[in-house]
Image: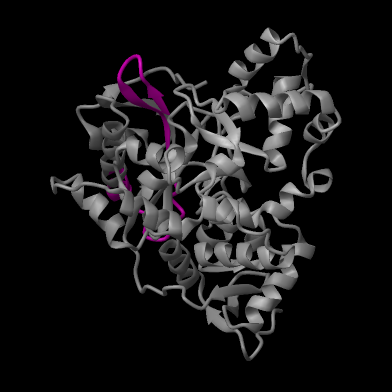
């Protein structure tokens, strides 16, 4: 039996869920407007809309899978609706940059000010870096050659760098790590210098290759020239960002946002509690203590509608997703096809305050359609209504297809929700065979 402390804020799971959704921007006017715009209202998303989302969520996780679209594009679409990709290009690749890349919650776009808060990680490559990165730091000759080329000719992709080094007679080996990348010595050196903060991405090519340049040339001067914050101050600031993005969170949630260790996060949480920024809380049904951010909104109702990429900060911590929504979520990209339960690239569907369905999605650019090989209803969710879910999901799929430049939505045969979704989308395109990878 969990005994409540007298100073704890007591919350129901429904209240915690609404707080979390509001903290992530799903109760904002911009989100309500996105869902009205597909009914015919004229609307233009601006860089200001995107900036407000980024101020809320703090980061965009990057992933290389492109079966639907690049992962970092979708959290913005989920919150504000269709936007011009040029806005994100301006934010990530043009001065003054609003987003830069680093290892935050995995590889991520973060504001330059947050990049500065991660300098402690850059200085602890022997503790924080994985083996391949650490070993690359031992090849001093290659590091010096790569530094010199980037300094003289950056921004450069890894391929362009390798070509320049070869022209100068500087060659290295290309070795796989047994399960993932087949990186050359030059690429490994680049990634080492990226980890320690000497170089960063000045933007991406159309093929999503990083264009590496000196970090001092990419960051705004005020950030590049600012002194390194003490690690304890950085931990406190990072936990504060995570707390605002969550609204309500356990220690595990707060640590996971920027991949902090317990010894780094716990003193920071204690300091924020002492300062009154975090309020001790207890959520009904949660076994762990929680923390409520003092500025967190507590809406009485949230009327959201969005498809969520697997790397969306609302759901990327799977334990939290299950605790908030009663929704068990596992990505099956690396599961053999015959063993997948729901599909290759499955997105939860948020409607109102609940995750009511999940759909396997694929952008078939050659055919010009958004394919839905499988659609599955979360029928145990309170108040679940098949027709309501199918109609709302059909509207969301049409909105996404239009944003991706696809001419229609093609419904497959897999999943209990597929027939109702097909009716809601009529005239939809039938897909008798599951075309997902």
Instruction: Tell me which residue sits at (38%, 40%) in the image.
Output: 90
Task: Give residue 258's position: percent from left, percent from top.
Answer: 64, 54
Q: What range is drawn magenta here?
A: 362-390
- Would you place residue 396 above or below residue 427 in this image? below
- In reply to whether residue 373 is colored magenta, the answer given is yes
* Camera-side residue of 304 and 322: 304
Task: Give residue 423's position: percent from left, percent from top.
Answer: 24, 34
State the residue lying farthest toward the right: 138
- Would you place residue 58 above or below residue 279 in this image? above
The answer to whether residue 414 is visible is no
Residue 252 figure quarter: bottom right
Instruction: Tell me which residue sits at (36%, 50%) in the image.
Output: 50
Number of numbered callouts drawn: 0
- Would you place residue 319 above or below residue 73 in this image? below
Instruction: Tell me which residue sits at (62%, 82%) in the image.
Output: 275
Residue 155 figure quarter: top right
- Direction from residue 30 to residue 414 in the image, left or right: right
- In reply to whether residue 409 is colored magenta, the answer given is no
- Direction from residue 403 to residue 296 in the image, left or right: right
What colour scheme governs how the chains and residues are painted in the rendered image of this protein?
one colour
State the residue lying farthest toward the bottom: 6
The answer to whether residue 224 is visible is yes
- Would you place residue 89 above or below residue 407 in this image? below
Task: Give residue 322's position: percent from left, percent from top.
Answer: 57, 56
Q: Quadrant of the N terminus?
A: bottom right
* Camera-side residue of 175 and 395: 175
Task: Give residue 384's position: percent from left, percent from top.
Answer: 37, 55
């Amino acid at each position: 039996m969990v005994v409540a402390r007298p100073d704890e804020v007591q919350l129901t799971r429904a209240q915690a869920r609404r707080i979390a959704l509001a903290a992530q921007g799903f109760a904002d006017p911009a989100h309500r407007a996105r869902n009205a715009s597909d009914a015919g209202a004229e609307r233009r998303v601006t860089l200001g809309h995107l900036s407000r989302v980024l101020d809320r969520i703090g980061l965009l996780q990057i992933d290389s899978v492109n079966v639907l679209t690049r992962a970092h594009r979708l959290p913005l679409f989920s919150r504000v609706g269709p936007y011009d990709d040029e806005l994100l290009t301006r934010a990530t690749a043009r001065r003054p940059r609003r987003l830069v890349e680093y290892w935050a919650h995995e590889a991520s776009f973060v504001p330059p000010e947050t990049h500065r808060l991660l300098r402690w990680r850059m200085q602890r490559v022997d503790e924080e870096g994985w083996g391949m990165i650490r070993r690359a730091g031992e090849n001093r000759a290659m590091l010096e050659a790569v530094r010199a080329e980037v300094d003289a000719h950056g921004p450069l992709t890894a391929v362009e760098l390798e070509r320049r080094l070869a022209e100068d007679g500087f060659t290295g080996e290309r070795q796989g790590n047994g399960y993932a990348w087949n990186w050359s010595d030059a690429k490994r050196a680049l990634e080492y210098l990226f980890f320690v903060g000497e170089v960063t991405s000045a933007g991406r090519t159309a093929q999503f290759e990083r264009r590496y340049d000196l970090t001092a040339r990419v960051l705004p001067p005020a950030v590049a020239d600012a002194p390194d914050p003490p690690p304890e101050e950085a931990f406190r600031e990072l936990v504060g960002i995570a707390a605002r993005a969550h609204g309500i969170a356990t220690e595990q949630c707060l640590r996971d946002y920027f991949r902090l260790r317990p010894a780094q996060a716990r003193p920071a949480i204690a300091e924020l509690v002492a300062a009154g920024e975090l309020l001790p809380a207890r959520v009904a049904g949660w076994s762990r203590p929680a923390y409520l951010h003092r500025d967190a909104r507590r809406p009485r109702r949230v009327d959201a509608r969005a498809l969520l990429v697997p790397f969306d900060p609302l759901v990327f911590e799977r334990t939290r997703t299950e605790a908030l929504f009663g929704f068990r979520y596992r990505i099956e990209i690396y599961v053999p096809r015959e063993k997948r339960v729901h599909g290759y690239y499955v997105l939860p569907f948020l409607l109102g305050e609940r995750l009511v369905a999940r759909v396997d999605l694929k952008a078939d650019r050659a055919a010009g359609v958004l394919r839905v090989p499988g659609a599955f209803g979360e029928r145990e969710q309170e108040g679940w209504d098949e027709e309501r879910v199918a109609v709302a999901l059909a509207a969301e799929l049409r909105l996404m297809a239009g944003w991706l430049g696809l001419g229609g939505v093609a419904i497959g045969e897999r999943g209990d929700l597929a027939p109702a979704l097909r009716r809601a989308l009529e005239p939809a395109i039938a897909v008798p065979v599951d075309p997902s990878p």
